[in-house]
Amino acid sequence: MAQDDLSTLLEQLEHPTTGVERHIWLIRLITWVRGAEDAPEAPVARVTLLLDVLAARPHTTSLLRSWWAELLGTVDGSTLLSDYGFGSRNAFMSELMERLNRKLLPATPETQDASELFALVLNDPRDARWIAALPADALTRLATLLSLSVPPPGPVGALRPVSVWQHTLLNALTFCVSQIRATGFSQEMRLRMSSPVRDGSPFHTLAADLDKVIDTWLGGANTGAAAQHFRTQLDACRQAAATVYSHLDAHGISVDLVFRLRQLRERVLRVRALLDCLLDDTDHTSTARLLSHLASVGQEQRSVGALIASNSSLLAAKVAERSSETGEHYITRNRAEYRAMLGNAAGGGALTALTTAMKFGIMALGLSAFWYGFWSGVMYAASFVLIQMLHFTLATKQPAMTAPAMAAKLKDISDSQALQAFVDEVTHLVRSQMAAILGNVVLVFPVTVLLSTAMVLTTGAPMLTPEKADYVLHSLTLLGPSLLFAAFTGVLLFSSSIVAGWVENWFVLHRLDSAIRYNPRITAWLGALRADRWAQFMRHNISGLAANISLGMMLGLVPAILAFLGPALDVRHVTLSAGQLGAACAALGWEVVRSPALWWAAASIPLIGLLNVGVSFYLAFRVALQAHNISGVDRSRIRSAIWQRLRAAPMSFLWPAKE
């Protein structure tokens, strides 16, 4: 749209217009005021120019006031002031769909909804800045120009003259307070508030306290005491709602409930802003601040990412916290724990050899891509769950769990002693991860060779044909895309940890352990003692089960789905890759040691492990930093301290020192 000049815009006031034409004219006027500059000084200067021109042209001023009166008669400003920036429905998913609609579907100025018109008029991020920068004299002149009196009879009991703006504020206050009370009285909120707060809930008297403020103001009396008491009750409502967070922290996070809590908090702040505009705004700065805030909120309301980030931050924190608790078990700090890790990893490697054999068995069935991926995923999931149940270790499961544990320790890293303690944890983590990978790989290769040899002795055929063995060597070669696939596998490993944290939070939030333990139908079926054992088992293992099952299905299905959609990405898991290499060597015999393909494939194994571990750890670490609200960490100090430890005691990263 070409930008109009001021003369053209003011000339259009001479002609009668319909509702939609008034809205379009307002959009063009604000576009002219906004201009193309980033700095707010230019729009402020244009507002001053508009006021000067109108002061010199009384007839145009009269036309503008008539135009303004017609506009206010067709749109309801009270809903704008009370509801703009809040979810149209009090649920996270409803608001998410509403924002997606706003982003994808064009809006029309043919509307009687003041909120829709406001979003069309002030649709630029710069609008909030220039409105906030308007000087006091410009605000006073604008208020004089646009102030309209409420036609008789006006508000009931009003002894003071009330403008249209003030009448709109009164209605907006009533609407906003009713929304606060509705949220505070909702079943989800009441059940989760602390008992003392719930019994003496400030939500009960909030409407009556507002009525007292309004009646006092309309009567022309001093509102100081009534307004102060109402503000105190508002704060009490916000504090009562805040007690729900303690319940969420102990019993699981609901994104929908977090959304409602944030809406309630923002509505309390909106009521305070509206009250300031009504009672304490002789210089109109509170009104400018409110309009600037609404313009800023309008930008945030268009962002789907901001909605998800703000309302899922607590869930991310809870997921990180639960992963942190699990991750502590994967960090070895002494020789006994280190030897135990080696043993557990060796057991995991031996079982993964069986997984490798089953994978090639499924491949031999000649299934279609989807069903091959599905049954491979089922087999992987069953294998990983078996490893979990036998308390063995799969090396690549560690990083996504240990990263939150490491991030949590960055909270208190300001002094040198805390920094050295963090470096100690880094050495423990690297050493633990090396032990896990070593235990996996050192066992999976020979056990796979032994399995293949046993198959030759019993069936007369090895695990792989020579043709398939050659294919395995060339698929694992360092000269191919194996490293890209290994990084992609790291993303899947991280994703499985997120699924694990989410499922455990869901399990705790819905109190399913208590349901298993005490539900009459379940106890009648299992018996009380067995139900109690199942409840304990599920509570302690739900995270690991979710992680292993989701990882297995992703390793099997995601490559098949991506191949159908276009990107031909495969998985490269270090333990499974080492097992496949062992099967290929067993099929090709001793002559394979002369083949360069073997050594190129062998050279890729440590790098595959590094990328599996590094990518999943990095992604989980970043999420954990955000979830714990850790920022401003001096990374150079951490790097220097780690390099200093590496130079002074390099073996500490590989083998624990004597206690």
Image: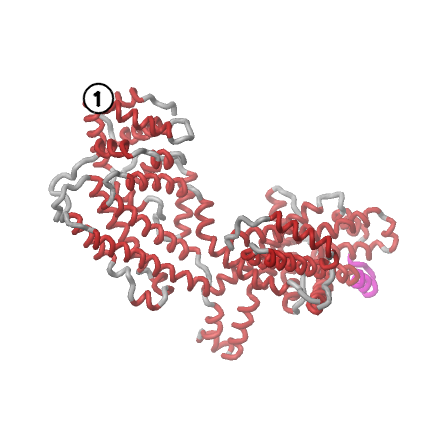
Q: Quadrant of the C terminus?
A: bottom right
Residue 303, image x, y percentages: 43, 42
In the rendered structure, the answer to whether residue 153 lies left or right of residue 524 reads left
In the rendered structure, the answer to whether residue 503 lies left or right of residue 189 reads right
Q: Which residues are magenta?
A: 449-463
Counting other residues with Cα less than 10 Å from the Cα at mark 1, is it few (<14), some (14-19), or many (20 or more)? few
Q: Is residue 36 above or below residue 504?
A: above
Task: Assess whether residue 455 is covered by the magenta stretch.
Answer: yes
Give the residue drawn at x 30%, y 24%: 49
Task: Label 1: state its secondary structure.
Answer: loop
Q: Which residue is mark 1?
A: 57
Give the residue drawn at x 77%, y 54%: 581
Q: Magenta: predominant secondary structure element?
A: helix
Asked if one can make out residue 375 in the rendered structure from this viewpoint, the answer is no
Q: Mark 1: which amino acid?
A: Arg
Give the residue drawn at x 70%, y 59%: 431
Q: Nearer the viewer, residue 30 or 428?
A: 428
Q: Nearer the viewer, residue 579 or 646?
A: 646
Task: Assess whether residue 108 is covered by the magenta stretch.
Answer: no
Q: Which quadrant of the figure has residue 407?
A: bottom right
Residue 570, image x, y percentages: 67, 48
Q: Is residue 252 above or below residue 622?
A: below
Q: Which quadrant of the figure has residue 500?
A: bottom right
In the rendered structure, the answer to whether residue 625 lies left or right of residue 117 reads right
Q: Quadrant of the N terminus?
A: top left
Q: Nearer the viewer, residue 371 or 652?
A: 652
